[in-house]
Image (cartoon, helix red, strand yellow):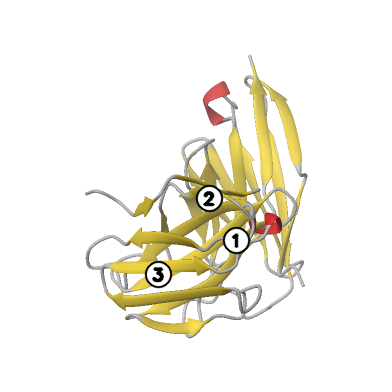
Amino acid sequence: QQQVKQSPQSLIVQKGGISIINCAYENTAFDYFPWYQQFPGKGPALLIAIRPDVSEKKEGRFTISFNKSAKQFSLHIMDSQPGDSATYFCAASKETGANNLFFGTGTRLTVIP
Amino acid sequence: DAGVIQSPRHEVTEMGQEVTLRCKPISGHNSLFWYRQTMMRGLELLIYFNNNVPIDDSGMPEDRFSAKMPNASFSTLKIQPSEPRDSAVYFCASRTRQGNYNEQFFGPGTRLTVL
């Protein structure tokens, strides 16, 4: 059973546009929601993360929006650039106890010039 | 900082052969994770260790897969015998209990092809 569901599977955006990737989770015990970025031939790397005590977190052009009641969170990339082309994974975990990450299936983002 | 080191980077083998993947976590990290990545299933957690002790191996596909962590600086994932459906990229990641202890640092992966 997929603990975290992610969409879309792939996304093509024009340079300067907004990229939006959505995720939903089932386990209400999750309290840590990171996004990982993966370039071809590399391992995933932490991009940005949020905890459920806030509804939004922004770091540069990257913003996470979090809706606790809907059990959904999303990544927004403003002013998308060709260098943002990568695969993005959302994930969720508990911060204490058995806190391994459950990953979504990934979104391949292509930003065209 | 060398990051997480994995070897080999690429492995091509024939069905039925034994495959051993190796991982050196970041020094001082006390948790280690093995993942498998495929197009169909994305990133799947196979097993993870805390302080060299296996905590959850429920993601290990079957008895053909085994993982060990004999010390804090080395882990292996072994597949015996290998099958074509094991072809995937295998990642190792490590984590520390200090700072943002939820952040996992991934290695570059091992691309395994079983013919």
Residue A44 in sight in this render:
no
The amino acid at mark 3 is Leu
Rendered location of residue A17, percent (x, y): 67, 25
Per the image, the residue denoted by label 3 is B32
The amino acid at mark 1 is Ala
In the image, A19 versus A103, the foreground residue is: A103
Q: CA distance from mark 3 to mark 1?
A: 17 Å
Disc on res. A36: 2
Q: Numbered disc 2: what chain?
A: A
On the rendered image, what quadrant is the N terminus of chain A found in?
bottom right
Q: Are marks 1 and 2 in contact (CB under 8 Å)?
A: yes
Q: Secondary structure at mark 2?
A: strand
Residue located at (60% from left, 61% from top): A91
**Left or right: A60 in relation to A86:** left
- Count neighbours of disc 3 (C-alpha within 10 A) and say few if under 14, some if 14 to 19, many if 20 or more: many
Rendered location of residue A74, percent (x, y): 67, 51
**Left or right: B84 in relation to A41:** right
Q: CA distance from mark 1 to mark 2?
A: 8 Å
Q: Are marks 3 and 1 in contact (CB under 8 Å)?
A: no
Disc on res. A91: 1
